[in-house]
Image (spheres, grey):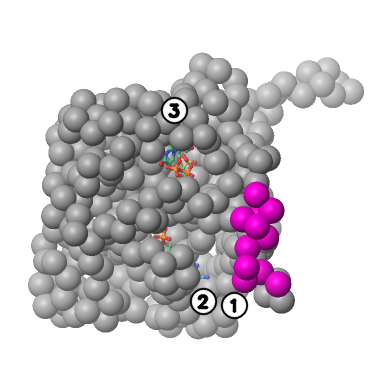
């Protein structure tokens, strides 16, 4: 029997992961979430395209379908502010693993205004500190599986040289001549949000060294798709589908835009190459990471949770070809290279047994069907980008209206 806590289990990746883990008879799952993502939707005047249920309805529906023994627990805790709440939960449940999704994850939101930048830094960094400190001071010292990002590496500034899984071999000149070593791959974050994941990495290395904690950091690419085997089982279990300018990620935005016949919003030339993974593979990767922990005393295990890489323009052309929807090239609101190559090693998770789902598998059409089904809920006004950090930021946008006094 494995006890697992899923921090951020109300979110896009966390909810289907909690269900996937709870579906196995050996696991007992408890979700921890402060429901902040739902509050940010209200703040932005945006909503998931799919009609997501309340946490209570989600949990009741799951128990009805899977039975009492498979029921998922829930604790409403703000992990950035409640150290003793996390410690108490760990000591009461004695989990074998904690999956940590609970961070503010939108790059555009983190660059929107001073308030959202400071919130993102504070929330993500304080949450990770409290979780690590609670694990170090707990009785069971569970394995921590954290969702990091490919964005800690930057995107292929070394051209076609593959990005390794976390660690780079280097030769260091020393008094005794050149010595071989391995260091964390040099960080190159592209937003405040991505920067918080770089800070997380340094904390993981330190806590693994100081306290012998077992930590896995999954450097995930952009997740696409929406449904998994469990979220499809009942309308009340449906996963969220973000499409607004802040939280909608590129491929899901294009799929949703195609479904409502909105021109596909390519930023700049679309020459940006990024790494991708389907949501069904995300949940499988988490399970594989839990089953393959590092040993106590090992350095942090880092796996690139990625299955494919694509150029943004390639994706737009693919979906335009599939649906006949036009492509619109918009001025890029972000500070990023107009074009980049990106070659990424991703052998660890496949070595544990992941069989990658690829874009060619017909899932694009399935996601368009989901988006078509809920097209009547689409609010076109939230589709354009509304966060700018490319040096041409209108002062009003940078400062926002609500900022004064709050930071
Ligand atoms: P999400 O915003 O949908 O979910 C995050 C969840 O964490 C939300 O339910 C939110 O309420 C909760 N949360 C945030 N701060 C919290 C706090 N202080 N206390 C308790 N709960 C808190 O995001 P997601 O897309 O599910 O991403 C999950 C993780 O995966 C993130 O850490 C993100 O960086 C990482 N990731 C996501 C993607 C992607 O494409 N979605 C890609 C790579 C990595
Ligand atoms: N883009 C467009 N048009 C759009 C939206 C985005 O051209 O309508 C472009 C962006 O300019 C960017 C690329 O698509 O070059 C990716 O943008 P994105 O919003 O899909 O992804 P990103 O901001 O990188 O963030 C997402 C998740 C984040 C995660 C990251 C993984 O929100 O949590 O960490 O993907 S990665 O990109 O591999 O670092």
- In magenta stretch: residue 367: no
Q: Name the residue under label 2.
A: 78
Label 3 crowd (10 A; few <14 / some 14-19 / many >=20): many
Q: Do the residues labelled 1 and 2 touch (CB within 8 Å)?
A: yes
Q: Mark 3 points at which residue?
A: 270
State yes or no: Cβ of the residue under disc 2 lies below 8 Å from any atom of ligand 1.
yes
Residue 171 coordinates in the image, percent (x, y): 72, 21
Image quarter (top left, top right, bottom left or bottom right) of the N terminus? bottom left
Label 2 crowd (10 A; few <14 / some 14-19 / many >=20): many
Residue at image position (29%, 25%) is 317
Question: Which disc, if any, is residue 103?
Answer: none
**Relative to the observer, which residue lies in front, 113 or 52?**
113
**Relative to the observer, which residue lies in front, 354 or 19?**
19
Image quarter (top left, top right, bottom left or bottom right) of the C terminus? bottom right
> How many tags in the picture?
3
For the record, the magenta segment spans 394-404
Q: In this view, does 55 lie to the left or right of 196?
A: left
Question: Which disc, if any, is residue 81?
Answer: 1
Inspect this view and state whether residue 218 appears: no
Residue 187 coordinates in the image, percent (x, y): 64, 38
Residue at image position (35%, 68%) is 10
Residue 121 coordinates in the image, percent (x, y): 64, 60
Q: In this view, does 312 lie to the left or right of 124?
A: left
Q: Are marks 3 and 1 in contact (CB under 8 Å)?
A: no
Residue at image position (42%, 81%) is 76
Inspect this view and state whether residue 20 appears: yes
State yes or no: Cβ of the residue under disc 1 lies below 8 Å from any atom of ligand 1.
yes
Q: Quadrant of residue 233?
A: bottom left
Q: Is residue 120 left or right of residue 27?
A: right
Front label number (3 vs 1)? 3
């Amino acid at each position: 029997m494995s006890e697992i806590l899923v921090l951020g289990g109300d979110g896009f990746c966390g909810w289907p992961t909690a269900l996937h883990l709870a579906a196995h008879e050996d696991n007992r799952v408890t979700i921890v979430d402060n429901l902040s993502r739902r509050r940010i939707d209200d703040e932005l005047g945006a909503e998931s395209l799919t009609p997501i249920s309340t946490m209570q309805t989600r949990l009741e529906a799951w128990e009805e379908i899977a039975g009492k023994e498979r029921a998922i627990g829930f604790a409403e805790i703000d992990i950035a502010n409640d150290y003793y709440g996390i410690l108490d939960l760990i000591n009461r449940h004695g989990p074998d693993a904690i999956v940590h999704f609970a961070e503010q994850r939108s790059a555009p939101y983190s660059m929107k205004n001073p308030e959202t930048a400071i919130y993102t830094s504070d929330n993500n960094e304080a949450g990770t500190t409290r979780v690590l400190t609670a694990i170090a001071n707990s009785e069971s010292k569970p394995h921590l599986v954290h969702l990091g990002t490919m964005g800690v590496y930057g995107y292929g500034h070394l051209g076609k040289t593959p990005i390794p899984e976390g660690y780079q071999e280097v030769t260091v000149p020393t008094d005794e001549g050149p010595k071989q070593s391995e260091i964390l791959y040099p960080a190159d974050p592209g937003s405040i949000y991505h920067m918080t994941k770089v800070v997380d990495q340094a904390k993981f290395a330190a806590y693994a060294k100081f306290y012998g904690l077992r930590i896995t950091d999954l450097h995930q690419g952009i997740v696409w798709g929406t449904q998994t085997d469990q979220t499809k089982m009942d309308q009340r279990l449906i996963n969220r589908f973000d499409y607004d300018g802040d939280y909608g990620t590129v491929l899901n935005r294009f799929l949703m835009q195609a479904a409502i016949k909105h021109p596909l919003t390519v930023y700049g030339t679309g020459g940006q190459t990024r790494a991708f993974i389907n949501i069904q593979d995300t949940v499988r990767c988490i399970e594989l990471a839990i089953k393959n922990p590092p040993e106590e005393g090992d350095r942090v295990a880092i796996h690139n949770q990625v299955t494919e890489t694509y150029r943004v323009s390639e994706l737009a052309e693919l979906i335009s070809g599939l649906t006949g929807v036009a492509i619109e090239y918009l001025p890029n609101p972000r500070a990023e290279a107009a074009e980049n190559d990106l070659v990424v090693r991703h052998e660890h998770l496949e070595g544990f047994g992941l069989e990658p789902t690829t874009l060619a598998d017909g899932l694009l059409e399935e996601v368009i069907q989901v988006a078509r089904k809920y097209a009547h809920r689409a609010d076109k006004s939230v589709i354009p980008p509304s966060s700018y950090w490319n040096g041409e930021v209108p002062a009003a946008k940078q400062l926002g209206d609500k900022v004064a006094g709050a930071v």
